[in-house]
Amino acid sequence: MKKVYVSLNEAEWRLLLYALNNLRSSLIAEGRYTDVVDEVMLKIINAPIRMVKAAG
């Protein structure tokens, strides 16, 4: 599997978790499995924080 790195600021990070949580909730309401969404959410929550210098 190819690794993908994404740079997010705090607002984008929160929005991503919010969207994934909404997806997870709708899957639960439909009675479907949430394993993949849970796995992605944990990866995002546990991802290391790296400080990057802004260009300019």
Image (tube, rainbow, N blue to C red):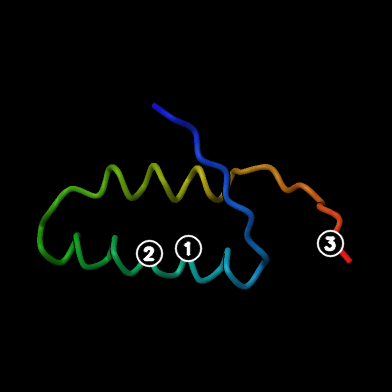
Q: Which quadrant would the C terminus be assigned to in this image?
A: bottom right
Residue on which the image places disc 2: 21
Q: Are the residues flagged by discs 1 and 2 in contact, CB closer than 8 Å?
A: yes
Please name the residue shown 62% across and 73% down the image: 11
Label 2 sits on what residue type?
Asn
- 22 is higher (above) or lower (below) than 1: below
Establish if 3 lies above or below 43: above
Q: Residues within 10 Å of mark 2 (few under 14, many from 20)?
A: some
Which image quadrant for residue 10? bottom right
Task: Provide the secondary structure element on which disc 1 rests.
Answer: helix
Give the side of residue 21 with respect to residue 11, left or right.
Answer: left
- Residue hosting label 3: 54
Mark 3, residues whose alpha carbon is within 10 Å: few (<14), some, or many (≥20)?
few
- Label count reads 3
What distance separates the C-alpha of mark 3 from that of mark 1?
Answer: 24 Å
Q: Position of residue 34 (x, y in %)?
A: 25, 49
Q: Tag 2, which secondary structure?
A: helix
Residue at label 1?
17
Is 49 located above or below residue 4 in the figure?
below
- The x, y position of residue 16, in whole percent, is 48, 64
**First along the sequence among labels 3 and 1:** 1
Residue at figure coordinates x 59%, y 43% from the top left: 46
Q: Is residue 8 above or below residue 45?
A: below
The N terminus appears in which quarter of the rendering?
A: top left
Horizontal and vertical percent for residue 3? 49, 33
Residue type indicated by callout 1: Leu
